[in-house]
Image (tube, grey):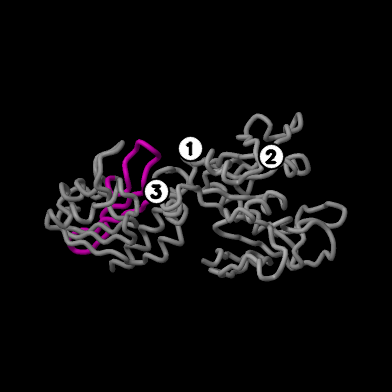
Amino acid sequence: MTPEDAMVLAIAESERVRGTTSPNPPVGCVILDAHGHPAGFGGTQPVGGAHAEVMALKEAGTKAQGGTAVVTLEPCSHYGRTPPCAEALIEAGIKHVIHAVSDPDPRGAGGARLLEQAGVTVESGLLADEVSKGPLRAWLHFVKTGRPHVTWKYASSLDGRIAAKDGTSQWISSETSRREVHAMRAKLDAIIVGTNTVRKDDPALTARDDDGIPLPHQPLPVVVGMSDLPDGAKLRHTALHVRTHDPDEVLTSLAARGVVDVLLEGGATVAGAFLRAGRIDRVLAYLAPALLGDGPAVVLDAGVSTITDAVRLTVEDVTMSGPDLRISAVPQT
């Protein structure tokens, strides 16, 4: 197996545990034996559990001796809730470590240096773009800024309407897109909506499978706004209600809870507030092949009064989700 093939598998391990490790990063690791054959796979366990390298070493056993560790993030060098992964790799007899992304967190950085001091050869940067824009995107942002990473997800018609003139909105997007969103929710730490959305749509903000059964991991539902939630609302007793209109106050509250990866789902007023504050880190738009001509817009009061104030985006990916067009874009820097 080539190192690239092993890194692809390590990324899959990282993605498999995403949503269960915060505030720790969802790291994936593959151990290759001395002949280059896969011997162990691992992903970071929930807080307090083993890191990816330790999980992969445990599966590899004695086959790790003289082998290679392929890992999405530089092995850590510090004692936290668990011992340093770099030391575990050294003790297992690993002779070569390949990691995609260097650890930007000063508390965990230095693993590569520790490995090299022990005679282990270290390479960095393999498939770094795929990792940094994939399963480690939110955590890397969290370390850099101290804020959760916010993805604004919405579904609309091609002319930017989230509902018809009479307020009906189910369903603008396709069943395929809705299934995709539920799978996405199961890998997140939290979902944010505003009090208006709760009053109008009464969402549950759960992640469910195709049969409507809740998936094992559920994100924290978060409601933003000053007004009380209606009696009988699904979120009245399950959601974190942050009574503010300030996105930074919301994100500070979530960061204190160890929330790293957030989905902003609505509505238009909340989306506008986050856009005005510059607190949307990615836009994920599902555009249905339909025209409504009238009805509520995707976003309101985004702080754009003239075309020169437009929030310009860089498109990362465009693909089909059933009949819908899915666009992933990030603000230009």
State if disc 1 and disc 2 touch (CB < 8 Å).
Answer: no
Is residue 135 toward the left or the right of residue 64 in the image? Answer: right
At which x and y percent is residue 294?
A: 85, 62
The crowding category of the residue bearing disc 3, from other C-alpha atoms within 10 Å (few below 14, some 14 to 19, many at least 20), is many
| Disc number for residue 25 | 3
Amino acid type, callout 3: Pro
> To which quarter of the image does residue 288 belong?
bottom right
Report whether 131 appears left or right of 321.
left
What amino acid is labelled 2 in the image? Gly
Residue 191, placed above or below residue 229: below
Please state the extent of the stretch shown in magenta in the rendering. 25-54
Q: Earlier in the sequence, mark 2 or mark 3?
A: 3
In three-dimensional space, the C-alpha distance between marks 3 and 1, rounded to whole angstroms, equals: 16 Å
Residue receiving disc 2: 225
Which of disc 1 and disc 2 is earlier in sequence? 2
Check disc 3 and report its element: helix, strand or loop.
loop
Q: Which residue is mark 1?
A: 256
Residue sitting nearer the eye, 308 or 25: 308
* In this picture, residue 290 sits left or right of residue 145: right
Q: Tell me: residue 305, above or below residue 194.
A: below
